Image (tube, rainbow, N blue to C red):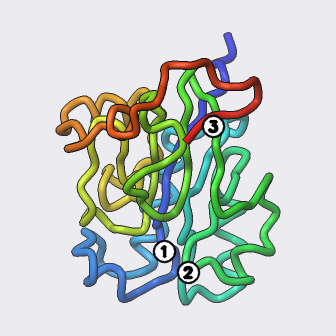
Amino acid sequence: MKRPQHVFFTSDQHFGHRAIIEMCSRPFVDVDDMDRSMIQAWNSVVRPGDVVWHLGDFAHRCPVPRTETIFHALNGTKHLILGNHDRQSTTRLPWASQSAFHHLVENKLQVNLSHYGFRVWPGLHRQALMLYGHSHSTLPGSRTTIDVGVDNVGYVPQTLAQLQARMALLPRLAFDIGRDLGEPDEPVAEGGFRP
């Protein structure tokens, strides 16, 4: 029996970036070991029919042929949320989509995707989630927001359920934007959401 399609989230592999190993205390001998290990980690959970939302910084200082080879070695239909290191060698790859920010509904939850961690985001007062990267495990998450970067989640792309389990262990935000603004509890228009 065929496994149903899964949706995964990840960011900040920095494929080809030698200096990131020391900068982030990554447990790899060299850049070849890092790239090989992260490709294996990705493909250990992502199957060809799955969807992966990559929240930026796919590769950095990585030669174009190497970047292309790595991209094509990774399973899944890949979407890119642009990061600060995503140059032409990354953006010219055949991503299913590319954008700076994306909002989706996954498992009946509103989910916002950005390379950068927002302090407030669309739907926050309705428990919409905010997934981000960029911070390499230095920006604390909460019950509604989390760094999906490889340095924060063990180098393996995560499903929303896995991320929610991690977020459940984190503190709540120190403020409630909906209550602070005194917004009425009214339905969201179809196809949209209220900040």
Which residue is rendered at x = 29% and y = 78% of the image? 29
> In the rendered view, would you say 176 is above or below 184?
below
Between the C-alphas of marks 1 and 2, the distance is 8 Å
Between the C-alphas of marks 3 and 2, the distance is 26 Å
Residue 47 shows which numbered tag? 3
Q: Position of residue 155 (x, y in %)?
A: 38, 55
Relative placement, left or right, of 21 versus 188 is left
Q: Position of residue 68 (x, y in %)?
A: 72, 73
Q: Secondary structure at mark 2?
A: loop
Q: Nearer the viewer, residue 174 or 113?
A: 174
- Which of labels 1 and 3 is toward the front? 1
> In the rendered view, would you say 19 is above or below 75?
below
Badge 2, how many Cα within 10 Å: few under 14, some, many 20+? some
Label 3 is placed on what type of residue?
A: Arg
- Which of labels 1 and 2 is toward the front? 2
Q: Which residue is mark 1?
A: 14
Which residue is rendered at x = 69% and y = 71% of the image? 69
Badge 3, how many Cα within 10 Å: few under 14, some, many 20+? some
Q: Which residue is mark 2?
A: 85
Label 2 is placed on what type of residue?
A: His
Label 1 is placed on what type of residue?
A: His
Return the disc, 1 or 2, that comes first in the chain's sequence.
Answer: 1
Which residue is rendered at x = 17% and y = 38% of the image? 171
